[in-house]
Amino acid sequence: MHVNIRSLLPKFVLLTALAHSANPDVLAVSESWLRKATKNSEISIPNYNIFRQDRTAKGGGVAVYCRDGLQSNVILSRSIPKQFELLILKITLSRNKSLTVAACYRPPSAPSCALDTICELIAPHLASEFVLLGDLNWDMLNTPPVLQSKLDALNLTQIIKEPTRYNPNSVNKGTLIDVILTNWPSKYTSAVFNQDLSDHCLIACIRYGAAVKRPPLITVKRSLKHFCEQAFLIDLARVSWKDIDLIPSVEDAWSFFKSNFLTILDKYAPFKKCRTKNRYSPWFTPDLTALDQHKNILWRTAIASNSPRDMQLFREVRNQYTQSVRKAKASFFRQKFASCSSNSKKFWDTVKSMENKSTSSQLPTALRLGNTVTTDKSMIIENFNKHFSTAGHAFRLATSTSANSSAPPAAPRPSLSRFSFTQIQIADVLKELQNLDPYKSAGLDNLDPLFLKLSATIVATPITSLFNLSFISSEIPKDWKAAAVIPLFKGGDTLDPNCYRPISILPCLSKVFESQVNKQVTDHLESHRTFSAVQSGFRAGHGCTSATLKVLNDIITAIDKRQYCAAVFIDLAKAFDSVNHHILIGRLSSLGFSDDCLAWFTNYFADRVQCVKSEGMLSGPLAVSMGVPQGSILGPTLFSVYINDVALAAGDSLIHLYADDTILYTFGPSLDTVLSNLQTSFNAIQHSFPWPPTALKR
């Protein structure tokens, strides 16, 4: 399916509605008028992957939406100013079959050489089945001889036969400038639809043969069909939970709790496999579907009758449909925002859903690792796990990772009081359990937050005993150090594992425990003012707003003094994944942490593993030897400790830190002085970062 949209952004809501109602496998858009600054998340459609080739100057541009489940990747992307934009994708239909799809836009003012270049670029891809969709701005009802000779030489046939820009007063009722060209015309049937999005008609084709079925998204979850909360709680209360206090090993104590809890939980809420429906636009109502169908009928009637009255009636209903679609989406999100005005998390979740930032968790049909492409799902999740588990290894320090590493030492500090863990209270654990989000996923231990929340008053005491036993033994149950990782597609090449973001899910009780530990650690650090005043990440009373205001105030003050200002913005690649555990333990030691605490944190980092989990399948475990645990409660605090001393190396420049982002800036009476000071400070900063220089991105 193809449409010349003449600016995608203002018509994106209508394009989403089109994808919802027509459900095409491939939707090509020409004259997208997008710029590099436009993010894919701003124009993403649920259940589709987007590929684009923007024009560097004004106008033009093409984009292609391929539905989830189609193995698609870009094999050529080209833009030549004032000539054309071309995007070629390879879509794998089966193990031995593929389809090459191209989207092209050529402006009316393009020179004659543009056609030659387009033909040269597509010629190497014509050995297999090929389809080109786009707007070439040649009237194919009266095909120019030079164009026809090129198409004949390439064995390409135009399968659209009706005008695509309607003009009832012309001889042919319009012009045919939108094309679907293919080297296998017998496999396709085509159609021209109404003018919804611009003065161009929508064109489409159907390919004969076995359809590439959209694989169902399989999830495994607990069935609540026969769940009886009262019976579940009665059985839990019958367990002799006080016996956990007699078990000296934290691993054995955890096994006792886990086996008893899961035995009862599996009885009342067993696991089952479910097919998850594809995510569509929830604001697209049945009334809109009916109005869309009515509009399409009016278009066919108007074209057949060539009556101005029928065409006017179509336009009135089309405009009504356009307004209704926009109002439906606005009304839906207005109600969503009203319902979450007092909940900041739900508010931002709604913002993300409005911006289509939710990405697909469905496994790709194929994945490339090195020079090998695999389509076996079990191999795909194993390859994902290998890729994610080694994410930080490229940024290992060249020096030894032993405790005597030559990495930057912790800054000298005045004597701090020793910090040791204190016993956790049952009331605090009970409160944490009662505040659990019941909709969160369970970790690899299969203990769902919903059931821990329901049974909080029963299990709070044994869980508290388990937490305190961990402090005494300086050990953490191995299950709590195992993360389930879900790969989420970010956009780009579906074959490339770098285009997927790992989302880690840790066991629920490990996060409850870490929350209690984090409170004690944070109280110690904040009470002794160990965090730099210019560190705004992951701290109460600090944030993006406070960091921005501080930097802006400094700049405005300098401008008022008629001084020059220069800055370097620094981003750390894979910062959380490449934290060196030995260096971090040294940082904690310098902050007054007792030997027992250091032993606990050493065990916390030891023997961590992760598995990729998707569609009911689970990869084998792989060790994670670097980084702070993603998705953990302690991770952000520990990262702040790790990076805190960097602020001391700024010298004559100013610095501000927010998580893994750093701004280094300075002022002075002359530009030369400012740049010299900034370079000196940046050199010092490079040596103070506990990462190699290759990890710094400016």
Image (cartoon, rainbow, N blue to C red):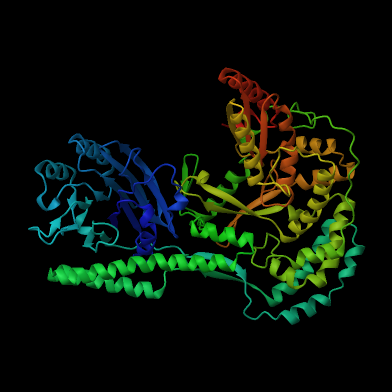
Q: Is residue 608 visible?
A: yes
Which picture quadrant has residue 431?
Answer: bottom right
Does 555 sit left or right of 197 as displayed? right
Q: Residue at x 77, y 55 (%)?
A: 515
Residue 300 locus on image (x, y percent): 20, 70
Residue 488 locus on image (x, y percent): 54, 53
Indicate whether 561 appears above or below 203.
above
The quadrant of the image that shows the C terminus is top right
Q: Residue at x 25, y 38 (%)?
A: 83
Residue 51 locus on image (x, y percent): 39, 48
Does 293 sit left or right of 153 as displayed? right
The quadrant of the image that shows the N terminus is bottom left
Does 174 sit left or right of 73 as displayed? left
* 105 or 336: nearer the viewer: 336
Residue 36 locus on image (x, y percent): 42, 41
Which picture quadrant has residue 304?
Answer: bottom left
* 77 or 447: nearer the viewer: 77
Indicate whether 691 appears above or below 635.
above
Indicate whether 304 appears above or below 104.
below
